[in-house]
Image: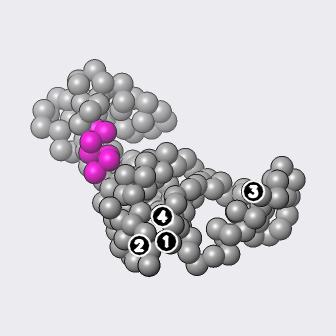
Amino acid sequence: MSLPVSLKEVVGELDALSQGMIAYCNRKTGKVTSLTERMLAAVEEEEDLSGFDEDMLAELRGIVNSEDWVALPDSFEIHEWEILRRFVERVEDDRIREELLRAIHGAGAFRRFKEVARRHGLEESWYDFKRSALERIAREALDAAGIPYA
């Protein structure tokens, strides 16, 4: 029987993902871990294994070759910018919403957004909104994989 996975841990792992990383969840143990695409490619193709000790290689092979490990949504599937846009659209003050909309376009959008959100006291609301969105994504992924969570 599968252990329930910590939804909080899965959300934390999804929140920490950067481009080129993939989070995995073990349906039997509840363990959650992230791997880089380089790590996966090295194991899948058995190339460029220098820099990996035998224990790490064994763990990586176990993740790649086991049906117990399930890949979670990656940064492309999460669409953080879309989550950001949905948050901005919910801001009630027209002036602040317009300022945030301008901030989220172009290079440096996330940095500018955070600066504007901080200036208007919206940081905590943003993090709550983002956490809720990631929780929904995590629940959907775990449900689709048949992994219980708590």
Q: Are marks 2 and 1 in contact (CB under 8 Å)?
A: yes
> Can I make out residue 137 in this image?
no
Q: Position of residue 116 (x, y in %)?
A: 31, 26
Task: Look at the image and give the residue range highlighted in magenta.
Answer: 126-132
Name the residue beneath numbered marker 3. 56
SS type, badge 3: helix
> How far is mark 1 from mark 3, CA to CA?
20 Å
Label 1 secondary element: loop
Q: Position of residue 131 (x, y in %)?
A: 32, 47
Position of residue 96 in the picture relative to residue 82 (left or right): left
Which residue ends up furthest to the top in the rendered image?
119
Q: In the image, 34: left or right of 87?
A: right
Q: Where, quadrant-wise, is the N terminus in this rendering?
A: bottom left
Badge 3 or badge 4: first in the primary sequence = 4
Q: Which mark is drawn over residue 147? A: 2
Q: What residue does disc 1 label?
A: 27
Q: Is residue 88 above or below residue 7?
A: above
The residue wearing badge 4 is 30
Viewer-proximal residue among 127 and 116 = 127
